[in-house]
Amino acid sequence: QVQLVESGGDSVQAGGSLKLSCSASAYYTYSYYFMGWFRQAPGKEREAVAAICTGNGRTYYSDSVKGRFTMSRDDAKKTVYLQMNNLKPEDSAMYYCAWGFIPDYRQVRETRSYNYWGQGTQVTVSS
């Protein structure tokens, strides 16, 4: 069982920045282990935002956040981060951290690829 604890959600104005953190109880610096960020707005499906391989640092970003969001990791702290810049109202959602073993990189954007999920942290962006 892997426990994930997210933090950093808040309410900000459009154009602002936030940094989300996710600490994991289990963290492996081997290939194919990924930690990802997903978000879900009311009435919408959960969607992938970004992911990082905790082994080699390979990242994935959805088209909607590419160039604005950056994912990073601190292996010593067993923590990954999501730096979100130039936030837009459409970024408002509950953000979830996820953990999974994903050999096929093409699957890192799929919710079914992740075995463990955090409780979520709310991000609200006002115009």
Image (cartoon, rainbow, N blue to C red):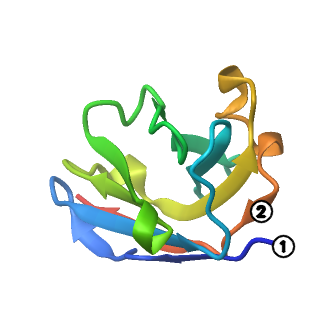
Residue 41 lies, with reference to residue 55, above or below; the image says: below
Image quarter of residue 11: bottom left
Identify the residue position indicated by label 2 in the image: 116
State the image coordinates of residue 51 (x, y, percent, origin top left): 53, 42
The quadrant of the image that shows the N terminus is: bottom right
12 with respect to 6 (left or right): left
Helix, strand or loop for disc 2 = strand
Residue at (31% x, 44% y) in the render: 69
Image quarter of residue 21: bottom left
Helix, strand or loop for disc 1 = loop
Give the residue type at disc 1: Gln
The quadrant of the image that shows the C terminus is: bottom left
- Residue 42 visible: no
Identify the residue position indicated by label 1 in the image: 1
126 with respect to 120 (left or right): left
Residue at (53% x, 62% y) in the render: 95
State the image coordinates of residue 48 (x, y, percent, origin top left): 59, 41
Which residue in the rendered view is the most extreme toward the left? 15
22 with respect to 45 (left or right): left
Assess whether mark 2 and mark 1 are in contact (beta carbons under 8 angstroms).
yes
State the image coordinates of residue 34 (x, y, percent, origin top left): 62, 45
Question: Of tags 1 and 2, which is closer to the observer?
Answer: 1
- Of the numbered discs in the image, which one, if any, rests on residue 112? none
Whole-number angstrom distance, CA of label 1 to CA of label 2 = 8 Å
Question: Is 101 or 91 nearer to us in this picture?
Answer: 101
Give the residue type at disc 2: Tyr
Residue at (58% x, 56% y) in the render: 41
Image quarter of residue 13: bottom left
- Residue 88 visible: yes
Question: Is 21 or 120 nearer to us in this picture?
Answer: 21
Residue at (60% x, 62% y) in the render: 96
